[in-house]
Amino acid sequence: MNGAEYLVKFFQDKGVDVIFGYPGGSVIFLYDVLGKSTLKHVLTRHEQGAVHAADGYARVTGKPGVCFATSGPGATNLVTGLANAYLDSVPLIAITGQVALNCIGRDSFQEADIIGITMPIIKHSYMVKEIEQLPAIMEEAWNVAVSGRPGPVVVDIPKDMFMGTVDISVPHKRIVTRKGPQKNGLEEQLPKIIEALSRAERPLIFAGGGIISGQAGEELRKFVDYTHIPMVTSLMGKGAIPETREDVLGMVGMHGKPAANLALSACDVMLALGVRFSDRVTGDPKKFLPDTAIIHVDIDAAELSKNVIAEIPVVCDAGKFLNKILEKMKEKKTKFHVQGWLEQIKEWQRKYPLSYEKGACLKPQQVIEEVARQAGDKAVVVTDVGQHQMFAAQYYPIGGVRNFLTSGGLGTMGFGLPAAIGAAFGRPGENVLLFTGDGGIQMNIQELATAVKNRLPVKIFLLNNVCLGMVRQWQELFFAGNYAHTLLEGNPDFMKLADAYGMKALKITDPKEVAAMVSQALSEPGPVFVECVIDQGENVFPIVPPGGKPSEMLGRWPGEAHISRIS
Amino acid sequence: MKHTLAVLVENQPGVLSHVAGLFARRGYNIESLAVGETEDSSISRITLVVEGDEKVIEQVSKQLNKQVEVIKVNDITNDEIVVRQLLLLKVAADLAARQEIMQIVEIFRCRIVDIGKRSLIVEATGDEEKIQAIIKSLRPFGIQELVRTGNVAMVRGVK
Ligand SMILES: Cc1ncc(C[n+]2csc(CCOP(=O)(O)OP(=O)(O)O)c2C)c(N)n1
């Protein structure tokens, strides 16, 4: 069996049902074999599309996404997508072709040192220099991608390796890790944690993406049910348990929900699960919650006390931790005293609701609310990056596991459309709802072809404000309204564009049309492009100005005419 | 404070760039780095001297531990350790100065490994302090060339 056949068999044995990729010289032999096999391959229109699609697939399924690219420009086109997956801990395997072994290091045609380029932005990488190593490397690459804190792995394969012979009759040498086991400190810490939480007057759970990638949603739900401790999430933790529940206060951070941010600022004991305290949440980490005792549980030891100091650090898988602590608490019949605290939170929710002004102009929030109302909390929701992303995070309550896909860590414009395509492959038969901006969609607009070709039920809601809204908002608030290079004059006619790609196109301009148009888009089979012409001046509130504390939110509060800070 | 870390890694290409790259991009300061095979040729040992407080060193160790090829990270700063670096130094030495240089070499128990017409090469091993002292003592004669390694370190055996 040759190297290419081995790869195809490897992925089939692993249960991979689709690969996203783009061919070229150094992988032509691999594609020759792939084309004759039963392994499904989706041709995107750009390698960045392929890697984001693999990422979207991985996010909705929990299985590694796989993408192929050729050497040189093909490989370098993956870079943004790899960094994106790395920062959001998404398991990916990227196979890049490389020039033949004897051409390496000679600046050969389409040679790029992709291992060197990607070193700081991926979990790990391998170059296959001897065909005998291929099986062991693939096995280890897979394990590295999925184990511990997941992440992207690159396997760079010189073109002659695809033609080399792999002998599968002999068992291949396994690479065994010689790392020792990690101390997690769980047993010693558990009593302290239970003590701290049960004594707390204002305890709070802060859940992140680790709950989702660690499949610990069910355990977390049981924990919340037992303790009645209220919960907030990071952007990545959205949907960790259904946001429709009363005790889930929603997202915290720069554009977090007011009551969630206030609870975050006021809690005396925080149980942080699978979060990394990004600066979008903490502002200045030195000033972040100086009086709160933080219990930080993460599978990645390097996250503990990296950004904020944890009083009680635990290196542990979130699900395992929650099982253990719940068992102990039930055994001890631990009680929690949160009634007063819950009332305080309710009061904040009444006083500082999320709200926007409805008027003659179409508002992005209205579109999102209406889609949420019709499609429900169990739909798969994908966003691009910008204002619409924050509106979606604020106004679309997520009820299902792995149902909210967004580029959290890297904030990659152009992620949305290809990620939605990947998600549609991962969840066949389900509608995938994409909220995107006129800036972001144009960064990977070529993937409209991929959606059409594969008749994917991706419903694209383009919230078109004819500008780079999020940057425009900052210019308005912090740069005296100097709108330097944020107005997207020269946008195409999106209706004609969608039509040219053969995609059903709808346009909403009037707030009164929203319900009917959304209904049509959702019931139409296949991809639909819905352009929503929205108010250019709409801003995302609340906003914690950069460097501020989470409680220092600007917003327009009920009964007030102007934007003000909560005092 | 300076910390000495002994890092065992898989002896594979790319490991050193992983470790060095990690320091660069996370903004840690490497004072010195020495690497070589261990008694098991499939394992290398990197001795790192890093500047930073406890918090920084804890982060450094955790980040190192995260690397796939890193097997074990030991902070041996507070252990009983033997620390050595190697110095080669070419010093100007005309006939008049030679005697005095030989005396210094004698006192520090280093060696002369090359005798040229107008220069000598001095080889010395020792800890940072000793190496500094040797350099200082030989400086007045005129140092023509100097090369030294980073620290290597080993924890002493149980007494
Ligand atoms: C690749 C990339 N380039 C630049 C940015 C900086 N950026 C963040 S949001 C934003 C504006 C996005 O505009 P649009 O896609 O129209 O969405 P809107 O904010 O208007 O909803 C920009 C330029 C980014 N996040 N990613």
Image (cartoon, coloured by chain):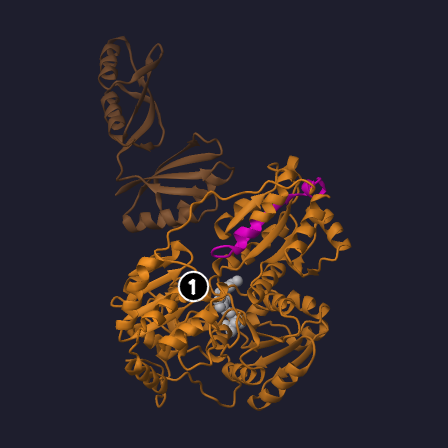
Chain colours: A orange, B brown
What residue appears at the point 59 percent right and 54 percent down from the top-left corner?
A93
- Tell me if the residue at label 1 has its CB under 8 Å from ligand 1: no
Residue A145 on the magenta segment: yes
Vertical side of A442 occupied by B65: above or below: above
What residue appears at the point 43 percent right and 31 percent down from the top-left corner?
B38
- Can residue A441 be seen here? The reply is yes
Q: Position of residue B112 (x, y in %)?
A: 32, 14
Residue A532 on the magenta segment: no
What residue appears at the point 32 percent right and 69 percent down from the top-left corner?
A270
Query: Outermost residue toward the right?
Result: A36
Along the line of sight, the residue nearer the viewer: B106 or A93:
A93
Along the line of sight, the residue nearer the viewer: A192 or B130:
A192
Q: Quadrant of the N terminus of chain A?
A: top right
Q: Secondary structure at mark 1?
A: helix
Residue type highlighted by circle 1: Ala
Q: Position of residue A75 (x, y in %)?
A: 61, 51
What residue appears at the point 63 percent right and 59 percent down from the top-left corner?
A50
Q: Position of residue B135 (x, y in %)?
A: 26, 24
Q: For label 1, count other residues whose C-alpha is less than 10 Å away and answer few (under 14), some (14-19) or many (20+).
A: many
Q: What residue is pinned by disc 1?
A: A318
> A73 left or right of A210?
right
> A291 left or right of A94?
left
Vertical side of A261 occupied by B48: above or below: above
- What is the chain identity of the residue bearing mark 1? A
User: What's drawn in magenta, residue-wise?
Assistant: A141-167
Q: Position of residue B64 (x, y in %)?
A: 41, 46
- Can residue A487 be seen here? The reply is no
Vertical side of A399 occupied by A210: above or below: above
